[in-house]
Image (tube, helix red, strand yellow):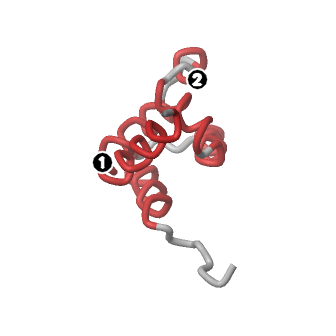
Amino acid sequence: MKGIVTMFNIFRLRNDEEEFTDELYAFITDPNADHRNNRSIINFLHEVSPQIVSVAECMIIDGVDERHYVADYVHAVLNGYGIDPEK
């Protein structure tokens, strides 16, 4: 059953790019580290794609504060940009 729920959530992320962007942007711009790390999107991503959390944490360190940068990243992740199909 857990696999079915995970697949549904991944499908939902792909179909709701704007909401995913909003949630990740909120994580990146949240000044309270305790609150930021307890967001449900982050808990979910730790389970299915921890590398997204790592990149988001780098965005925090880099001081990203404009949503369009997060939107560009989310779009690339969800649409497979930068993935070498030969590998």
Q: Which residue is mark 2?
A: 37
Label 1 SS:
loop
Chain-order first, disc 2 or disc 1: 1
Q: Is residue 83 above or below residue 45?
A: below
Tell me how far mark 2 sits from mark 1, CA to CA.
Answer: 22 Å
Compare residues 36 and 66 and report the one nearer the observer.
36
Residue sitting at the far front: 1
Mark 2 falls on what kind of element? Answer: helix
Question: Could you tell me which residue is drawn at 45 percent across and 46 percent down?
Answer: 7
Q: Amino acid at mark 1?
A: Asp
Using the rendered view, name the quadrant where residue 50 is placed. top right
Q: Residue at x 48, y 40 (%)?
A: 6
The residue that label 1 is drawn on is 16
Residue 19 position in % (x across, y down): 31, 41
Q: Quadrant of residue 75?
A: bottom left
Camera-nearest residue between 41 and 61: 41
Q: Amino acid at mark 2?
A: Asn
Classify residue 85 as left or right of residue 6.
right
Residue 85: name its quadrant. Answer: bottom right
Between 36 and 3, the residue placed more toward the observer is 3
Q: Which mark is residue 87?
A: none
Quarter that holds the C terminus: bottom right
Return the x and y of residue 84 as percentages of the image width and height.
62, 78
Q: Is residue 36 left or right of residue 58?
A: left
Mark 2 burial class by Cα count in 10 Å: few <14, some 14-19, many 20+ = some
Q: At 45% from the left edge and 54% from the top edge, which residue is drawn?
A: 74
Residue at screen point 45% across, 40% down: 4
**Residue 82 x/y as whole percent:** 57, 72
Number of callouts: 2
Q: Is residue 87 left or right of residue 34?
A: right
How far from the left and from the top, in percent, is residue 61? Answer: 65, 39
